[in-house]
Image (cartoon, rainbow, N blue to C red):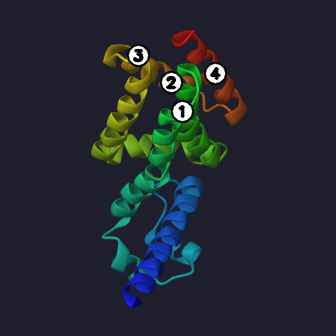
Amino acid sequence: MVSTKGDERDAMRRAEILEAARECFLQFGYAKTSLDDIARRANISRPLIYRKFKNKEDIFAALFDFMLEGRYPKAEQALAGPGSKRDKLFRVYELLLLEPWDEMVGAPMAAEFYEACSRLLPEVEAKHERLLLKLTQAILETKELSEVFMLAVDGLQGDLPATRVLRRRLQLLVERFVP
């Protein structure tokens, strides 16, 4: 029982650190965010961060995972639930693209955040791409069509549109791929 309380407290502390890191990275950018900034934002000491993470890159990798990991079970549920292929495809991308986008768009360093993910964490990004491809392919059926759809989705984000604009673009794209 005691370890469960301790595990819950550790998970909460980790989530607080990651939320503080997200705010700092989106406000200052990766390069200008320090562990002191994250510690101040999380209202904890810097040594406590080191008890949870090795360094800033470790926090950044954990944050990227944190932002998406909890969404995959919901995407799997959407995939398994009722609805047309079109509805399912839109819902999967709503969960894995639009919701995280909405949390970040408009932040001063949102574009730099995505660029830093690609540059610093290619293995983490590749893992998420594989998971998204798997979900997309479950709907569109072929790997080739799924890859083309995912490339098109990437193109929708290039100008960092508002969430409502990205949502509409995604709706149009889904309608083209799943008539």
- Element marked by disc 2: helix
Label 2, residues with CA under 10 Å away: few <14, some 14-19, many ≥20:
some
Sequence-wise, the earlier of marks 1 and 4 is: 1
- Element marked by disc 3: helix
Label 3, residues with CA under 10 Å away: few <14, some 14-19, many ≥20:
few
Occupied quadrant, residue 97: top right
Q: Is residue 68 visible?
A: yes
Q: CA distance from mark 4 to mark 2?
A: 11 Å
Task: Identify residue for label 4.
Answer: 171
Label 4, residues with CA under 10 Å away: few <14, some 14-19, many ≥20:
some
| Residue at the outermost bottom position | 2
Q: CA distance from mark 1 to mark 4?
A: 10 Å
Contact, mark 1 vs mark 4 (Cβ under 8 Å): no
Between circles 4 and 2, the one closer to the viewer is 4
Q: Position of residue 2 (x, y in %)?
A: 40, 90
Task: Identify residue for label 2.
Answer: 153
- Element marked by disc 4: helix
Which label was assigned to residue 148?
3
Identify the image quadrant of the N terminus: bottom left
Task: Identify residue for label 1.
Answer: 93
- Name which residue type carries label 1: Tyr
Q: Can you say whether 163 is above or below 104 in the image?
A: above
Which residue: 58% across, 73% down?
Answer: 41
Q: Can you say whether 33 is above or below 148 in the image?
A: below
